[in-house]
Image: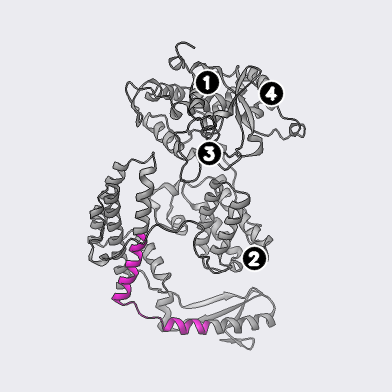
Amino acid sequence: MRIFGVDYLCKRGRIFYFRRAIPTHLVERFQRKEIKVSLRTRDEFTARICCREISNRFEKLMFRVARMPDLTKDKIDALLRGYFEGLLSKAEELAVMIPDDPDIDITFEIDDLQSNQIDFKKRIGKRDYDNATLLDAEELLTTNGYRIPRKGNEEFEIICNGILRARSEQSRILGAMLQGDYENTEPIDPLFKGVQFPGLPPVPGDKSSPSASTVSSVINGYCDLKSDHDWVPKTLDENKRILGWFADFVGPEKKIKGVTVDDCRDFRNALSKLPANFTKSKEFKGMSLREISQKAGDKPKLNVGTTRKYFGCVKWFLGWCEDEGEIASNPAQKIKVMGKVNQQDARHPFSKDQLIKLFQSPQYTGHRSANRRSSPGEALIKDGKFWVPVIGLFTGMRLGEIVQLLVSDVRQEDDISFFEVSKGEDDDKNLKTATSQRAIPIHPELVKMGFLDYVEGQRKKTPQGRIFSEIKVGANGYFSHNFSKWFGRYLKQVEVKTAKTSFHSFRHNFKDGLRNAGIEDSRQNALMGHSDGSVPSTYGTGYSPKVLNDDLQKIEYPSLDLSHLYVKDS
């Protein structure tokens, strides 16, 4: 095809394109019949130059691909053994981490691994390959320079079979490690015999940087910069997750300059089709975001607020790329997520019946042991799991603010005991916003339950420590991580959990308590850690604990009787 005096140059509308057929003998490897690339110009002279340059690159690519070696049995075995080595590294990491996590039941994990191994063996025999296996096979092949179709290809099926065998072996070996049975951690599958443990995976940030200006490399640079100056660990993890979806969607090795408006629009559209809670669903495990959006069907979708937040992360990132000169303009700038945020999607306060059921559950009336709090018994352990929920109910503090409290954060002024919610001098204490720093008087109900005595006991043990020192930091760097998971499980166990209630519901209960007590808005904001948006509110140090204490005394939950928790001599 020769148009405008140049081979393979064509025009659609007012934009010029390079378009060329792939040689017939290479169509199967590329899984397409032609390559078409927008030259992103309306100028014919510029288009001719670009077309010749792309044509030369096309010839070089065809030359390399035509000479790529075929997949022999030895090469397939080498790929699979390398894949298995990576799984061994992950198993070694999990064997170190799982025993240190107080919220993981090791017996359950071992049983689950044994069940997985049985399931893998059944699927190996039936040649039944799930989406996770198919995706792993594709990634293993493409990252090593091979492009072969899924259907009707013997090599692809051998790779899938090997991946299931590798995952079966990993389950068996990790189960043995968790039982301390290291005599049975050598690979027994003939395909993987002799593969050695490679050691733990590299620490994040301690790996070789990818080639510059690809989508993945620029995302890494952006996240590194933000984590150094702006983001707390939780924000970093969330952005990495969302931007990772975007990178996988457009292609991690794609040049950042090649990201188009169409890419961003397609990503927005895929987000809008995602089912609610898709990250927690086993049905979609191992699928790409694109596949999940295509197979979501009629399942309830993500709410508009969540979709807007996800797409906003990408828009902010591309805006930063524009500011940094990585791209000429932000291709997502004018793309919007349509729809209204449904207020019904927000968290609800606990109902009267839920509060009664929760605080009459074994956690607060007597339980079997520290690890079996939902089972009735003689024990009544007053530790963090006991105190944190009642503090949430009577202070409205966020979970993260409560679990990071130091004993020195319980103070007294003008005979008023109060919590001082503040950021620490190191990274162990964080606040959501600047207005989160505040003083919250300690409610009389907490005093009657013996909370101040509990704090004094903790102060004697560790004068500079945290009040709830037994609550360990989670995998995401936050003390709230493990507690949040435990509390969610406990709510289910005592049949209080609903889709719209969580620990954050206490904050809604407290807000309702403030409204029902007739507290004026500015003092409500002071107690909740919200800004009231007025200029005068930015002056001075805010309300004193004594003034706020008068308000706090008025907060009550009439249907809730907690007298069974009072200390007898208080």
Reply above or below: 331 against 65. above
- Residue at figure coordinates x 60%, y 58% from the top left: 222
Disc sitting over residue 452 in the figure: 1
Q: State how far apart marks 1 and 4 are (Cα).
A: 20 Å
- On the image, the x and y values in percent for residue 129 come to 31, 61
Disc sitting over residue 533 in the figure: none
**Earlier sequence position, callout 3 versus callout 4:** 3
What residue would you read off at disc 2?
Answer: 326
Q: Name the amino acid type tagged 1.
A: Leu
Answer whether residue 73 is magenta in the image.
yes
**Earlier sequence position, callout 3 versus callout 1:** 3
Q: State how far apart marks 4 and 2 are (Cα).
A: 50 Å
- The quadrant of the image that shows the N terminus is bottom right
Instruction: Specify start and end residues of the magenta stretch as a single range.
Output: 58-87
Q: Name the amino acid type tagged 2.
A: Glu
Does the image show residue 152? no
**Earlier sequence position, callout 3 versus callout 2:** 2
What residue would you read off at disc 4?
Answer: 544
**Earlier sequence position, callout 1 versus callout 2:** 2
What type of secondary structure mainly makes up the magenta span? helix
Answer whether residue 561 is magenta in the image.
no
Left/right of residue 351 with respect to residue 11 in the rendered view: left
Mark 2: few/some/many CA within 10 Å (<14, 14-19, 20+): some
Reply above or below: 423 against 255. above
